[in-house]
């Protein structure tokens, strides 16, 4: 199998970028991008570190990030499994990307920038919910922001096709694959109740 190892070969294969794909890029939140981000309840946060890359889904029952100003976003880190892969990466290499999705829209908004972590008490308190605070907050500085056209979501039929959940393994089955003594069926059956008090 031949691989492409030269940027010139890659550019020759694809040709020039569509002009609007370059001119649409902004370096701060415009009113329209602010509207999108204030509506988004789901984002994928990607980071890079010495061990490689990481992509982490984050979700909220309201805006998934808080807009501090037109170049700064705050993302709380709620209760999880404490692997903290993304957070480790950010401490060592602040480069991040975010992909915001809004249910029902086939467009996606992307941000590339940098991030730092804080456990500042006042900031943690400002996110308190259900008597709990996040363990830390990721502060993201926008380098560039732009929308991604709808082709990928249209191809996948993400919002329009029948649900595929019955075709894929459950979390319990994934764990059973590496630990046969684990009661995956009980885990799956009880997870919604288990998670109810651990969302925030």
Image (cartoon, grey):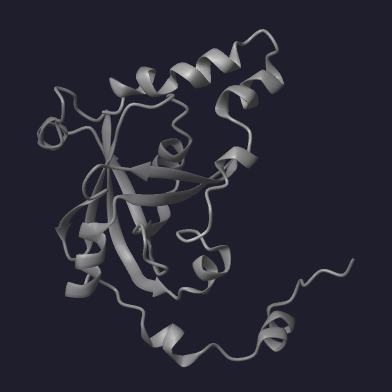
Instruction: Tell me if residue 23 comes above or below residue 170 in the rendering.
Output: below
The reply, left or right, for residue 130 in relation to residue 81 is left
Q: Residue at x 21, y 46 (%)?
A: 62
Instruction: Tell me if residue 45 comes above or below residue 144 in the rendering.
Output: above
Q: Residue at x 44, y 24 (%)?
A: 81
Instruction: Tell me if residue 185 comes above or below residue 70 in the rendering.
Output: above
Q: Residue at x 70, y 12 (%)?
A: 180
| Percent x, y of residue 61 | 24, 42
| Percent x, y of residue 115 | 33, 50
The reply, left or right, for residue 171 in relation to residue 73 is right
| Percent x, y of residue 161 | 53, 58
Q: Residue at x 17, y 73 (%)?
A: 31
Quarter of the picture holding the C terminus = top left
| Percent x, y of residue 7 | 68, 78
Quarter of the picture holding the N terminus = bottom right
How many discs mark residues in the rendered view? Answer: 0
- The quarter of the picture where residue 165 lies is top right
């Amino acid at each position: 199998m031949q691989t492409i190892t030269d940027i010139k070969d890659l550019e020759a294969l694809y040709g020039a970028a569509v002009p609007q794909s370059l001119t649409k890029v902004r370096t701060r939140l415009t009113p329209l991008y602010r509207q999108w981000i204030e509506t988004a309840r789901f984002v994928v946060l990607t980071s890079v570190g010495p061990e490689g890359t990481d992509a982490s889904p984050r979700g909220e029952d309201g805006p998934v990030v808080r807009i501090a100003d037109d170049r700064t976003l705050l993302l709380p880190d709620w209760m999880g499994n404490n692997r903290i892969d993304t957070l480790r990466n950010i401490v060592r290499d602040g480069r991040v990307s975010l992909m915001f999705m809004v249910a029902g829209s086939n467009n996606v908004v992307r941000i590339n920038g940098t991030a730092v972590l804080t456990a500042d008490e006042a900031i943690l308190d400002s996110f308190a919910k259900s008597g709990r605070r996040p363990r830390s907050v990721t502060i993201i500085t926008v380098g560039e922001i732009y929308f991604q056209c709808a082709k990928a979501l249209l191809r996948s039929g993400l919002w329009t096709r029948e649900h595929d959940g019955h075709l894929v393994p459950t979390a319990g089955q994934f764990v059973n694959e590496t630990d046969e003594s684990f009661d995956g069926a009980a885990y799956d059956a009880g997870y919604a109740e288990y998670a109810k008090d651990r969302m925030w």
